[in-house]
Image (spheres, rainbow, N blue to C red):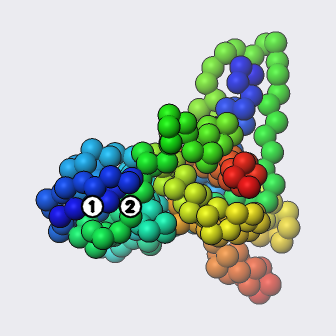
Amino acid sequence: VVNPKMAQLQNDGNVIFGLGPALMEQIVYDGGQATNPNLADYAIPSIRDLPAELISVCIESDAGEMHGIGEMTLPPVAPAIANAIEDAVGVRIKDLPITAEKVLRALKEKSQR
Amino acid sequence: MILNVNGNRRDVHEGTRTLLEVLRDELGLVGAKEGCGVGMCGACTVLVNGKPVSGCLVLAAQAADKEIVTVEGLAKDGKLHPVQQAFIDERAFQCAYCTPGFILSTAALLKENPNPSEGEIREYLSGNLCRCGSYQNILKAVSESSKRLR
């Protein structure tokens, strides 16, 4: 890892950006018109959404090639949260964002089955 | 109309435009950024009489008899403000579009509350959004600033 401090920061950013589509971000359309096209109605992660603990571990490998980190640790955030929810309460949410309402509905459906 | 900006009296013409527009377009102070334009993102934060306000929501004329501080006004005698230096030392930004707003909000927070808890920092800075997600380093920079300013 060439620059560990910036690698950690980039990874933090990926995780926090990834929390957005995973848990809160959704454009709502009504007849083709976006009804929440601003930051008042379309929430993105703020500093209050920063997890209490967020640790990046960079793994060194001689076989690794030199390349930028980019956003490669962003896509796993949503599936990781979905897996954690299934592990915790036994329901699998398959569409984003994973809202409290969706989890509650899934739990109710499960209990009726 | 006269605006008192960063300790200087500046003559401006367009009092009916937003403070942000006048600062950027008339006075060339482009530290404050337009993000959302509706007061939700904090990128346009400036201090008016020591309080952080969204420059996009205030008309220039409303700030006429007040003391305005932008990020350009924080450094003194060629030396960065301790909050600015802490943001650099802790690498508290990636693209840095939100940084002037975060720095001014932090400076205002530490004036009001020199030794804030992590919860108080999170609450005070929740009106500033960082799309790159550098919040963890921002928290460190605020704690570090608080130590240095005490």
Residue B55, position as x, y percentages in the image: 36, 63
In depth, the one of A42 and B8 nearer the eye is: B8
In depth, the one of B33 and B24 nearer the eye is: B24
Quadrant housing the N terminus of chain A: top right
| Residue A55 visible somewhere in the drawing | yes
Circle 1 chain: B
Res B18 quadrant in image? bottom left
Residue B68 bears which disc, if any?
2
Circle 2 chain: B
Classify residue A109 as left or right of residue B21.
Answer: right
Residue at coordinates 61% horizontally, 64% vertically from top-left? B111
Classify residue A59 as left or right of residue A18.
Answer: right
Give the distance between the C-alpha atoms of the residues marked 2 and 1, in whole angstroms.
8 Å
| Residue A13 visible somewhere in the drawing | no
Which of the two labelled residues, at mark 2 and mark 1, occupies the earlier sequence position?
1
The image shows residue B100, relative to residue B128, as above or below, that is: above
Q: Do the residues marked 2 and 1 share a common chain?
A: yes
Mark 2 touches mark 1? (CB < 8 Å): yes
The image shows residue A44, relative to residue B27, as above or below, that is: below
In depth, the one of B134 and B58 nearer the eye is: B58
Residue B3 bears which disc, if any?
1
